[in-house]
Image: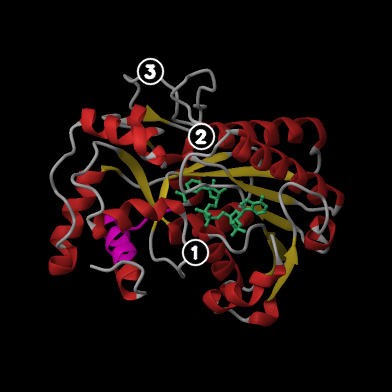
């Protein structure tokens, strides 16, 4: 197997991708913003340390990138800011997402990389469309003109578009493909987990008086890692986009699965719907709720049929993902049930 650069080794999806790559015989370079995190990340990855090298590199500046990608034939560019709440200004997300992708592409091309897989998102596909639209495919792009497209979906849309434009102009000889995951859940490796886990954490903690009428496609982190590895290795995937998603569930459905499957450990999980007007009022005080209030009541099904048909990718049952998310949060003492 060859050597692959996985950017953002401290991240949730990157961690599972690194694990799978090393298990399949790859040597892996990874970037972190600061090497002070190396030993902590090695601890939670628990892989063959001899196969994994760390490099310090930030999405917003050049130092470290040439060294990180040197000797790599493949790149999985996964790092991108995904904030726990609303940023003060959208450029806090857009600039590192876009410029980081372009920077990683430039250094990859200069190093002779053959294939570049970028982690985009369903957020680059299914936002800002008319509320009557409920089904989305890889042919769709989020609408940047809509006021409902908030900072994070903007950052993912702008970054993927910029990467594709750069590839068309300058990327000859390097294959480019994106993985576009829905909301990623699954077991956490440690306390530094992705913000996408927050919804399950808040339900288990009974942090809200009821459940907002919000929903999303759900996909398991282990299946997202597997789709990245397939994209790194499959034939004839240049320029493709692959949605990674299981079924669309409302938070209330997740709450019921937790109640049914965890028994007394799910005793704090609310099962009453929070009226939309109350969510909007709460959203004035809780920015992360405020920014998604425009998504109340929406149903958005992003089909992963393309990944199934072309790559033979098969996500696991969503109940397993939800229960494993909760189990790992409880077992690691991250939530107090
Ligand atoms: P995560 O655990 O928060 O990982 C994000 C990674 O990006 C971290 O390693 C973080 O480093 C790194 N990063 C952020 N800003 C950076 C910067 N300026 N310079 C260098 N590294 C930076 O989140 P994740 O869920 O694994 O997300 C990984 C990718 O998947 C992102 O591209 C995200 O948009 C995409 N995605 C996630 C979901 C989801 O539901 N989680 C869904 C669709 C797509 P630090 O540890 O130093 O902060």
Q: CA distance from mark 3 to mark 1?
A: 35 Å
Q: CA distance from mark 2 to mark 1?
A: 22 Å
Q: Main secondary structure of the magenta part?
A: helix
Mark 1 closeness class: few <14, some 14–19, many ≥20 residues within 10 Å: few
Which residue bears the numbered disc 1?
192
Q: First in sequence: mark 3 or mark 2?
A: 3
Viewer-nearest of labels 3 and 2? 2
Q: Which residue is mark 2?
A: 153
Sequence-first disc among 3 and 1: 3
* The stretch drawn in magenta includes residue 214: no
- CA gap, disc 3 to disc 2? 16 Å
- The answer to which image quadrant residue 280 occupies is top left
- Write down the region rendered in magenta: 313-326
- The residue singled out by tag 3 in the image is 130
* Quadrant of image for the C terminus: bottom left
**Residue closest to the far front:** 285
């Amino acid at each position: 197997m060859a050597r692959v650069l996985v950017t953002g080794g401290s991240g949730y999806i990157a961690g599972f991708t690194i694990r799978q790559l090393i298990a399949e015989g790859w040597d892996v370079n990874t970037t972190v913003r600061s090497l002070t995190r190396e030993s902590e990340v090695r601890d939670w990855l628990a892989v063959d340390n001899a196969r994994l090298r760390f490099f310090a590199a930030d999405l917003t500046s050049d130092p470290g990138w040439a060294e990180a990608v040197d000797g790599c034939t493949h790149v999985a560019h996964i790092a991108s800011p995904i904030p726990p709440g609303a940023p003060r200004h959208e450029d806090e997300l857009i600039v590192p997402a876009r410029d980081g992708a372009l920077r990683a592409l430039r250094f990859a091309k200069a190093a002779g990389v053959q294939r570049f897989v970028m982690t985009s998102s369903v957020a680059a596909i299914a936002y800002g469309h008319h509320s009557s639209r409920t089904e989305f495919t890889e042919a769709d792009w989020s609408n940047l003109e809509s006021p409902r497209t908030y900072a994070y979906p903007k950052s993912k849309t702008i970054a993927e578009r910029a990467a594709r434009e750069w590839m068309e102009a300058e990327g000859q000889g390097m294959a480019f493909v994106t993985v576009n995951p829905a909301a990623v859940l699954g077991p956490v490796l440690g306390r530094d987990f992705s913000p996408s886990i927050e919804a399950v954490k808040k339900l288990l903690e009974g942090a809200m008086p009821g459940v907002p009428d919000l929903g999303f496609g759900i996909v398991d982190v282990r299946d997202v890692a597997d789709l990245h590895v397939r994209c790194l290795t499959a034939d004839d995937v240049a320029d493709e986009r692959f949605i990674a998603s299981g079924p669309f569930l409302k938070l209330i459905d997740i709450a019921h699965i937790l109640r049914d499957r965890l028994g007394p450990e799910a005793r704090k999980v609310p099962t009453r719907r929070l009226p939309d007007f109350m969510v909007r009022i709460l959203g004035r005080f809780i920015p992360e709720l405020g920014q998604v209030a425009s998504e109340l009541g929406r149903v958005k099904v992003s089909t992963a049929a393309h990944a199934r048909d072309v790559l033979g990718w098969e996500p696991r049952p969503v109940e397993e993902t939800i229960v494993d998310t909760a189990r790992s949060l409880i077992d690691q003492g991250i939530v107090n049930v």
